[in-house]
Image (cartoon, rainbow, N blue to C red):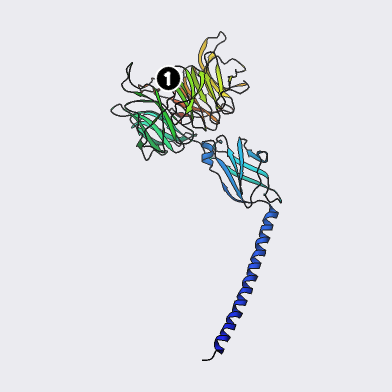
Amino acid sequence: MSTEQPTRRARAQRRRGRTFAASFGIVLGVLVVLGLGGAAASVAQGPRVTDVFVDPAAAAAASGSRLIVTTTQSLADVDPSQVTVSPETPFQVDTSGRSVGVRFTLPLWDDTEYTVKIAGVASLGGGPTATLTETFRTPKAQVYLLQRGADGGDLIYRTDLSGQEAVPVFRHDHIEDFRATASHLVVSVRTDDDEAGLIVTDLDGKDQHELPLPGDGYVSNLQSADRGDRIGYTFSDAQLTADSGRESRLYTASLGDPAADPVPIEVQGADPRVAEWRFVPDTDSILLLSFDGSLLLTGSGGSDSATALGVALGLDGIARGSNEAVVDRADHAAVIDLTDASEQQLVAPDHDLGGTTSVTPLPDGSTIRTAAVLDADGIPTGRTSVALVAADGATRMLTEIDDTDAVLQVCVSPSARYAAVLVAPDAVTNAYDTYQLPLPERPETRVLEISDGAQVVALKGSSISWCQVPPAA
């Protein structure tokens, strides 16, 4: 058998292998050159945007939303001085790898175009800097209101601020109160058997289910945290005696675990009965005022300890995006910084407003105050003023309510762009219902621009979803 044929075959295979290796080397070299050239061109141009993430609806609904810009290069830290947000709003900046994030520390205005400009953005490897500019628009505001006695029972409806696009969302024979979270409605109802119920739905009123309650009794002072889908309420047993039964006990629940039993909020050594309370914005804490006048800061998941903040007569509120609470002491109104328990007296308006009846805090340290309008002799005229008092005391009138009407509540939108004034028109003839939380038969919610006091719309109904607490009973 001849060996010549295998030898020629082997030589041909070796030639083909050398040709393939040479061709592969040339292609690889070209790719390397192109890659290096592309990298060099990228560095020469500075960082370029490859992706942008922002949720305008979430940014307008609550604080803490972020604009995240991802670029072609790993970035040097961006300083807040390099960032401009128009219209102006407070923000924080963080840099991670190829991305820079701008966190809005307050909710943004609705139906507004925002531009974020980041100047001098530099690569970690040096080279030219770049200016990154991104623009987005927030959606129109959507709010929920309660109408009792509507056709088919009590009704919660959703609308924009034109008042022309009202959509029924939830109906029930007896709605005491409700709150809206980022993804749910929580509705306090009474059943046909006059028992309490807490019904949770999606924001469109679908997927209804009930939350467990501590027992048979009464739910009041329903509230929701600005984030985390946590709610709270006070509960009293249906049967109370001088020696037995729970009265005005505070409970919280997570909508993320709707089958779980509610969590009692108990502070060791304190009166367990809670007169007023608030979720502290952007934290997991609760500020509560017990029946004995003790003001306490505690956790929202149940706690046996708390920070004592002295004695108070009332709790006016805590502005969203703020850790400052406005409370009524025995002889003055005070502002307490909940981060360190420091305190200062609430600033006085630069001119006398008359008898102040409510104080609603805003994130910038200003407040909206309602007051009885007095005549030249100091006699109440029956009218009510609604005024904005700046942090330095500068005072500007927003509106004045006629003496025929009664102001029931003032609430502020999450962005602090609007004030909602709940009014009972023609108060003398506008009878209240007989609910546990009574309301006039014809409530009206007047929405004002805080910047100039202009009325945006007057809506039929009460308990606008901007409110952190129910109307005062």
Q: Please, is residue 99 above or below residue 419 in the view?
A: below
Q: Which residue is mark 1?
A: 271
Image coordinates of residue 436 in percent, x first then y, are 36, 22
Res 25 quadrant in image:
bottom right
In what quadrant of the picture does the C terminus appear? top left
Image coordinates of residue 18 in percent, x first then y, are 62, 77
| Rendered residue at 44%/34% (across/down) | 230
On the question of residue 137 being in view, the answer is no
Front one among 5 and 315:
5
Front one among 244 and 471:
244
Which residue occupies the extreme left position in the image? 193
Res 452 quadrant in image:
top right
- Three-letter code for the amino acid on which mark 1 is drawn: Asp
Image coordinates of residue 264 in percent, x first then y, are 40, 28
Q: Is residue 69 left or right of residue 286?
A: right
Front one among 74 and 70:
74
- Give the tally of numbered discs: 1
Image coordinates of residue 393 in percent, x first then y, are 62, 20
